[in-house]
Image (cartoon, rainbow, N blue to C red):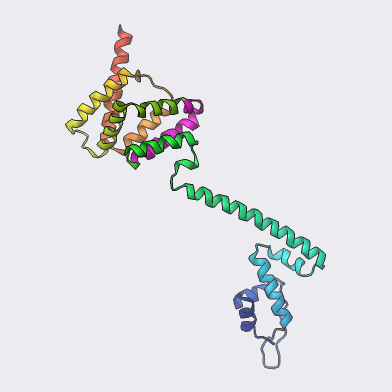
């Protein structure tokens, strides 16, 4: 005969758990003996182990009572159902683990492979992770707001990265993130970027998401904020001049 502490230890649970099973009616509570102690039989230990095993498997306590009193065939069928449910849960957790692992790269979770390849190419060129994150966010916004533009923009981006001058300007902008916004080097960079926009016909606003992207980049660096503001101002001046002619 076992004391409640011995019974709990046998099943690998706490005394408090045993008492809870008594309260919910899963495990009968024996009468006290002449010494005032409750003594448990070997059957109680077997029943407690079965209860603990089913509870650990996620079976609701209300269902455990029915299973304990089920016929062998009914019990076996119920166990098969429980096992199938556990397998489904394992599959879901495995998929969640796979997706969480992809968070290390971040972009793979929400962007198509061809966009991820562009970001990896930028990393290979030496672009810093701050700008990579901003670029990733830009692609996320584009995919949400103008999904038809993604394929075209991928082609354009790869073409830009193929061009040495465009790449030089991109890397120069990346390095300027920590510059003082009044650093004279920014003036030269603004001139170069403005000339590039004119040469490549980029004065037009292509997609409403671009305003959000520009705002996101501006928030990341005062120097970038000045670059974006200055280049946008020059583009607006050109548009105004065209309207006046």
Spot occupied by residue 59 in the image (x, y as percentages of width and height): 68, 63
Q: Quadrant of residue 14?
A: bottom right
Task: Kindly give the residue lying farthest to the bottom in the view shown.
Answer: 34
Question: In the figure, 47 relative to 111: above or below?
Answer: below
Residue situated in front as seen by the camera: 99 or 166 = 166
| Residue bounds of the magenta highlight | 130-151
Residue depicted at x 65% and y 81%: 7
Spot occupied by residue 5 in the image (x, y as percentages of width and height): 61, 83
Residue depicted at x 66% and y 88%: 37
Residue depicted at x 47% and y 28%: 150
Residue situated in front as seen by the camera: 241 or 206 = 206
Residue depicted at x 68% and y 75%: 48
Question: In the figure, 19 relative to 90: above or below?
Answer: below
Spot occupied by residue 46 in the image (x, y as percentages of width and height): 71, 77
In the image, residue 26 lies in the stretch drawn in magenta: no
Residue situated in front as seen by the camera: 138 or 27 = 138
Spot occupied by residue 240 in the image (x, y as percentages of width and height): 31, 13
Question: In the figure, 84 relative to 155: above or below?
Answer: below
Residue 230 falls left or right of residue 110: left
């Amino acid at each position: 005969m076992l004391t409640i502490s011995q019974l709990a230890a046998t099943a690998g649970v706490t005394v408090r758990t045993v008492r809870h099973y008594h309260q919910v009616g899963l495990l009968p509570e024996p009468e006290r003996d002449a010494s005032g102690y409750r003594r448990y039989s070997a059957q109680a230990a077997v029943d407690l182990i079965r209860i603990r095993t089913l509870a650990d498997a996620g079976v609701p306590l209300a269902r455990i009572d029915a299973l304990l009193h089920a016929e062998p065939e009914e019990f076996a069928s119920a166990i098969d159902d429980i096992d199938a449910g556990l397998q489904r849960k394992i599959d879901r957790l495995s998929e969640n683990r796979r997706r969480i692992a992809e968070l290390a790269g971040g972009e793979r979770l929400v962007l198509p492979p061809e966009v991820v390849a562009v970001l990896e190419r930028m990393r290979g060129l030496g672009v810093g992770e701050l700008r990579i994150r901003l670029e990733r966010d830009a692609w996320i916004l584009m995919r949400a707001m103008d999904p038809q533009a993604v394929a075209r923009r991928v082609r354009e981006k790869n073409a830009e990265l193929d061009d040495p001058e465009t790449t030089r300007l991109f890397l120069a902008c990346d390095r300027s993130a920590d510059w003082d916004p009044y650093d004279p080097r920014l003036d030269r960079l603004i001139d170069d970027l403005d000339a590039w926009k004119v040469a490549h016909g980029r004065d037009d606003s292509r997609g409403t998401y671009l305003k959000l992207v520009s705002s996101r980049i501006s928030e990341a660096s005062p120097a970038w904020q000045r670059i974006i503001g200055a280049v946008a101002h020059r583009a607006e001046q050109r548009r105004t001049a065209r309207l006046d002619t």
